[in-house]
Image (cartoon, helix red, strand yellow):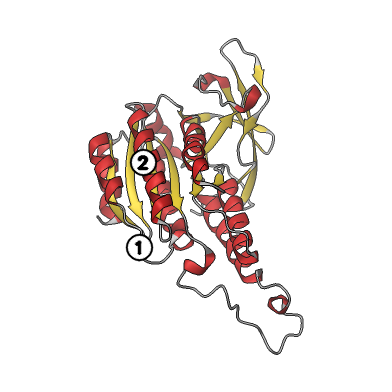
């Protein structure tokens, strides 16, 4: 299914905005971003209401123009990047099928894959039987594509988020190592005329640079990325790759879990889904600022007005260009 068709389908399915939000959107674009509130013991707070949140832009309070929380419609884009171990992929597949069956009715799940570019296997649906059947059919094949699809997946999700009144998250299921990519990261190009070229001394330099570029590319989309990596590798290049995946996800507000054993796959998936379920998406009017980014601070309080201290979000928003 083409990506452009998917966006059209989702905009028809989900309400674009409320009547009030429509009037506000005419005046200025709404900037939406994810927020989590963590309670004692590492659990996430899911009882937040619109009136319990305050947003400050460069220390000045900004009006909250839109709000989506755990009870609102939610799209989870599950993207398979499985190219290596069939046994691990089968464990992940069964864990995902089990988790999908437990999702509340406000969750719509879409299935995509990365081989040969981002491809839609099934558009987001509330039909658990249909998505389960597609998950069973996902194959271990081809070359890794996670790094190559991060930007188009984030762009797709951001387009939906901006137009529809939903929460959104991207969940990658991957077992790829750095050697699985089409690009040759194992033999970085060395500038023979530059004696200071770090590639001479650090074989993982090219990987680190690629991962840093990916952080810069996906962070402005403000779509949380979650990565379940099915296999931990200990060589230098893959340690740099795995560390980079953690930085990429963290930069978007998401998380990466790298499984050292097969027994960690199902619990790791449940941990990521718990964070996905607990997100809030807050929307503010695009700030009038001469600089390309603004500082953001969010405060949250419970129904009795008691402040909640552990509010998690990206402290900086890169403003979209007009």
| Above or below, comparing residue 294 to residue 100 in the picture | below
Examine the rendered structure and indicate whether residue 128 appears above or below residue 239: above
Between residue 199 and residue 1, name the one nearer to us: 199
Label 1 vs label 2: CA separation? 18 Å
Quadrant placement of the N terminus: bottom left
The residue drawn where x is 63% and y is 64% is 235
Q: Is residue 96 left or right of residue 45?
A: left
Category of crowding for the residue at label 1, using alpha-carbon neighbours closer than 10 angstroms: few (below 14), some (14–19), many (at least 20): few
Q: Position of residue 124 (x, y in %)?
A: 30, 42
Residue depicted at x 61% and y 47%: 289
Seen in the picture, residue 45 relative to 207 is either above or below; the reply is above
| Earlier residue among tags 1 and 2 | 2
Q: Is residue 305 left or right of residue 268?
A: right
Could you tell me how many numbered marks the image carries? 2
| Residue position marked by numbered label 1 in the rendering | 141
Task: Please state the horizontal and vertical placement of residue 294, each as a whole percent of the image.
Answer: 64, 45
User: Which label is found at residue 94?
Assistant: 2
Residue projecting furthest to the right: 196
Determine whether the residue tagged by mark 2 lies in a helix, strand or loop. helix
Name the spot of residue 185 as percent of width and height, x first: 56, 72
């Amino acid at each position: 299914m083409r990506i452009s068709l998917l966006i059209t389908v989702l905009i028809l399915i989900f309400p674009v905005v409320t009547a009030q939000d429509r009037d506000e959107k005419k005046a200025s674009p709404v900037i939406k971003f994810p927020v989590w509130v963590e309670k004692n013991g590492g659990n996430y707070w899911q009882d937040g209401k619109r009136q319990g949140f305050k947003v400050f832009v460069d220390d000045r309070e900004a009006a909250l123009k839109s709000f989506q929380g755990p009870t609102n419609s939610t799209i989870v884009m599950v993207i398979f990047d499985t190219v290596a171990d069939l046994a691990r992929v089968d464990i992940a597949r069964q864990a995902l099928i089990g988790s999908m069956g437990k999702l509340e009715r406000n969750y719509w799940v879409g299935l995509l894959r990365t081989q040969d570019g981002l491809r839609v296997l099934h558009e987001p649906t509330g039909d658990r039987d249909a998505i389960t059947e597609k998950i069973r059919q996902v194959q271990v094949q081809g070359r890794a594509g996670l790094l190559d699809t991060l930007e188009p997946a984030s762009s797709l999700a951001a387009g939906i988020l901006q137009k529809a009144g939903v929460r959104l998250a991207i969940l990658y299921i991957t077992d790829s190592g750095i050697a699985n990519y089409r690009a040759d990261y194992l033999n970085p190009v060395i500038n023979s005329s530059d004696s200071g070229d770090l590639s001479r001394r650090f074989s993982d330099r090219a990987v680190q640079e690629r991962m840093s570029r990916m952080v810069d590319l996906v962070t402005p989309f403000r779509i949380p990325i979650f990565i379940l990596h099915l296999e931990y590798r200990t060589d230098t290049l893959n340690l740099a790759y795995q560390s980079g995946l953690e930085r990429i996800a963290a930069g978007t507000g998401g998380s990466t879990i790298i499984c050292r054993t097969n027994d960690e796959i199902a619990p790791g998936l449940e941990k990521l889904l718990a964070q996905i379920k607990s997100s809030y998406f807050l929307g503010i009017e695009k700030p009038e600022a001469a600089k390309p980014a603004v500082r953001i601070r969010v405060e949250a309080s419970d129904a009795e007005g008691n402040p909640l201290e552990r509010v998690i979000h990206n402290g900086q928003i890169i403003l979209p260009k007009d």
